[in-house]
Amino acid sequence: MVDGEMVGHLDLRGGELASQLHRCWLGMGIVAPFRGKGGGRRLMSAALAWARAQPQIAWVDLGVFSANHRARALYDKFDFVEIGVRRDAFRVDGDVVDDIEMTLSVSASTSGSPASTT
């Protein structure tokens, strides 16, 4: 928050089935004028610290628009690994947008072996 105004968010969501609860899905956004000021890095650090402290969570997954190079660079800095591309995942203002699927191991038992969907 800046001067009482919400300028970004991050959420982690678990699966709907008990067999999916070892993974969570990360969603994040920063209001345009506040991007590039370290807020995304701080949100990501806090979320991943929380996820690593949860013994049942092994993976954090996310999707990012293929053209969102700033977000992709942030996820790369946190060692997320690209595991697939959903072609034509979205249509925004008439444009076709691919979604890059990424994952990060947050459990010592899964370290170094991305769960590939390809």
Image (tube, rainbow, N blue to C red):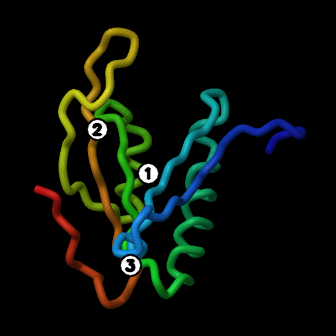
**Residue marked by disc 3:** 58
Q: Residue at x 37, y 60 (%)?
A: 61
Crowd tier of the residue under label 1, counting other residues whose Cα lies within 10 Å: few below 14, some 14–19, many 20 or above: some
Q: Nearer the viewer, mark 3 or mark 1?
A: 3
Q: Which mark is residue 74?
A: 1
Q: Residue at x 33, y 61 (%)?
A: 80
In whole angstroms, how far apart are the C-alphas of marks 1 and 2?
A: 16 Å
Crowd tier of the residue under label 3, counting other residues whose Cα lies within 10 Å: few below 14, some 14–19, many 20 or above: many
Q: Residue at x 35, y 56 (%)?
A: 76
Q: Residue at x 60, y 28 (%)?
A: 32
Q: Which mark is residue 99?
A: 2
- Left or right of 29? Residue 110 is left
Numbered disc 1: secondary structure: helix
Of mark 3 and mark 1, the one earlier in the sequence is 3
The answer to whether mark 3 and mark 1 are in CB contact below 8 A is no
In which image quadrant can residue 46 be found? bottom right
Of mark 2 and mark 3, the one earlier in the sequence is 3
Of mark 1 and mark 2, the one earlier in the sequence is 1
**Residue 1: percent from the left, percent from the top?**
79, 45
Crowd tier of the residue under label 2, counting other residues whose Cα lies within 10 Å: few below 14, some 14–19, many 20 or above: many
What amino acid type should be assigned to the residue bearing mark 2? Answer: Asp
What amino acid type should be assigned to the residue bearing mark 1? Answer: Leu
**Residue 85: percent from the left, percent from the top?**
19, 43
**Residue 115: percent from the left, percent from the top?**
21, 69
Which quarter shows the C terminus? bottom left
- Left or right of 14? Residue 91 is left
